[in-house]
Image: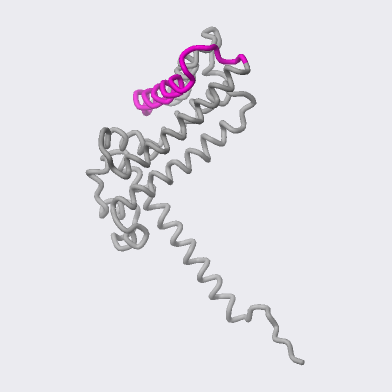
Amino acid sequence: MHVRDASPSKGQAPAVRQRSTQAERSARTRSALLESAARSLSRYGYGNLVLEQVAREAGYTRGALYHQFKDKEDLARAVIEWVDETWRREVGGLVDQQPDPVAALIAMARGHAVYCRRDVARVGMALRLEFSGQDHPLAREIERISETLVKRCTRLIKAGREAGLIPPGPPARAVALALVGALEGTVIALAGLAPHDERLAARAAAGVLGLDSQTDWATIS
């Protein structure tokens, strides 16, 4: 009985490589468009976002952009998700490596300041201000991401208090809200002033948490 060889023929290999190459090209195109759109959203806001300009600055045509995103809102939502994913990977990863809740919160403050040196990282802050008081799908997505961060900080603050590392005080959620607000204000006010942004973000976090004022938290890594 003849059994057909199930291994791919020589003629199939180029097709597989071609599909892989097309997927890689599509991923590169999408990444470039997301980064260009993030810069535009950070600088000009959603209302002034021009898709032709986004595509041009990324080095692609408007048609290439519409091949990836159906409209302006779809692009903006993808940017918000992309920025959140990179923050969780770069900053959240640092937080997860720390030995205790205080170290985690200080690492978050410093990492957030470093992350926000790129203008693309300011998308959330810019859109939160633009959509303030509005019931818009993008506003709801930004609020969801912000709430996730506040909850994470709240858990760390509670854990720090239980371990005796953070002194008692206002409700943990209130402190978490103040911490997030202090960090956003710090990185906005100190834009372009590295390395002072990172150091002062750490001090701002320590102050909100009520940590020992004699310790220079900006020098602790």
Residue 121 lies within the magenta run: no
Viewer-nearest residue: 43 or 166: 166
| Residue at x-position 74% and y-position 91% | 2
Magenta span main SS:
helix
Who's the residue at 61% across and 28% down the image? 98
Is 146 above or below relative to 9?
above
Residue at horizontal 44%, vertical 61%? 26
Pick the front one: 133 or 62: 133
Answer above or below: position of 178 versus 41: above
Where is residue 13 drawn, in percent x and y?
Answer: 59, 75
Relative to 84, 185 lies left or right:
left
**What are the residue bounds of the magenta stretch?**
164-192
Which quarter of the picture shows residue 16?
Answer: bottom right
Task: Please tell me how many numbered marks the rendered image carries.
Answer: 0
Q: Is residue 181 in the magenta section?
A: yes
How far across and how far down the image is residue 221, in percent? 58, 23
Kindly give the residue lying farthest to the right in the view shown. 1
